[in-house]
Image (tube, rainbow, N blue to C red):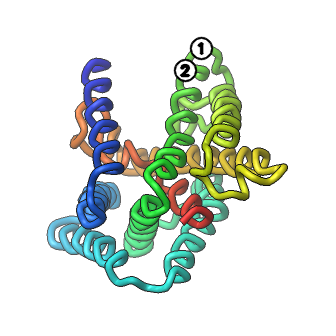
Amino acid sequence: MIVKRVLTAIVMIAALAAALFLAPKLVWIVLCTICAGAAAYEWARLIALQGAFCGVYVALVSVLTFSWPLLALPGTWSQAIYALAAVFWIFLVPSWLWRDSFPRAPSLRAGVGALIIFAATVALIELREAGPWVVLCVMGVVWISDTAAYFIGSAMGRRKLAARISPGKTWEGALGAMCFVMLYAFAWAFLSNGILPAVFTESSFGWLLLTLFMLVLAVLGIYGDLFESYMKRAAWVKDSGTLLPGHGGVLDRIDALLPVLPVAAWLFA
């Protein structure tokens, strides 16, 4: 299993890097749309959409995702989508998770899935316009956080972060993740050489702003991970899908990015 996971991860990272730096804009939009469609299909299965309803749902999310960047709408439209997604992740998700009160109405669950997948994918498309390195910077917050939380939690974890939702996560792992994200932020603040917005690299307290912002992203990433785990437990499944050998489905790989991308794009894009 570990060999399969590593090989799949290598292929995914290589494909992402190639697409980020080499693919024309239209190709990047198509690739992001394919990912959005796969994620929408997995979400539809988690909320038990069947047959034609599942197909229509996937088609609607995919068409909207593909069309949005081509419509050349004013930037305020995308900012509104990011703001809506930010409100959802910052205020609603924590309440739903800790109170186990996520509404069960299928239409609302479908709408939630469409919003978070659409907002994250559009953010990914627009962040690439700000530069491939910006995308890697934002994604790196999640990768650093996840990796540090796993290893530190495995070695030192004692107190469960959310035992009912995800028994493997611990407070020690989360604290370790925050520490490594701080180091990651320091590195970007002092070594990015103009890649990030000037407010983070040229002002006296830019490094502090960047550190705080990345810590917020890391916390949101944890909520994204927990929210997908919550949905999988409600659906009585271990993985959201089987598309990625050793890694489960697309949602299993992007769960922490779902809240991080739109909030980052709100500032960077």
Q: Secondary structure at mark 2?
A: helix
The percent position of residue 53, horizontal first and vertical second, equals 21, 72
Q: Residue at x 64, y 38 (%)?
A: 191
Q: Residue at x 51, y 57 (%)?
A: 261
**Kind of residue sitting beneath label 2:** Phe
Residue at the extreme front of the image, as rendered: 193
Res 237 quadrant in image = top left
Question: Where the N terminus falls, by quadrant?
Answer: top left
**Kind of residue sitting beneath label 1:** Ala
Rendered view: 234 above or below 266: above
Q: Secondary structure at mark 1?
A: helix
Q: Are marks 1 and 2 in contact (CB under 8 Å)?
A: yes
Q: Is residue 215 left or right of residue 30?
A: right
Question: Where the C terminus falls, by quadrant?
Answer: bottom right
Rendered view: 200 above or below 186: below
Label 1 Cα crowd, 10 Å radius (few <14 / some 14-19 / many 20+):
few
The percent position of residue 149, horizontal first and vertical second, equals 58, 29
Between 255 and 111, the one lying in front of the other is: 255
Label 2 Cα crowd, 10 Å radius (few <14 / some 14-19 / many 20+):
some
The percent position of residue 229, horizontal first and vertical second, equals 46, 44
Q: Residue at x 26, y 45 (%)?
A: 241
Q: Residue at x 39, y 69 (%)?
A: 114
Q: Is residue 247 left or right of residue 189?
A: left
- State the CA–CA distance, disc 1 to disc 2: 6 Å
The numbered disc on residue 155 is 1
Res 125 quadrant in image = bottom left
**Which residue position holds label 2?**
151
Between 253 and 76, the one lying in front of the other is: 76
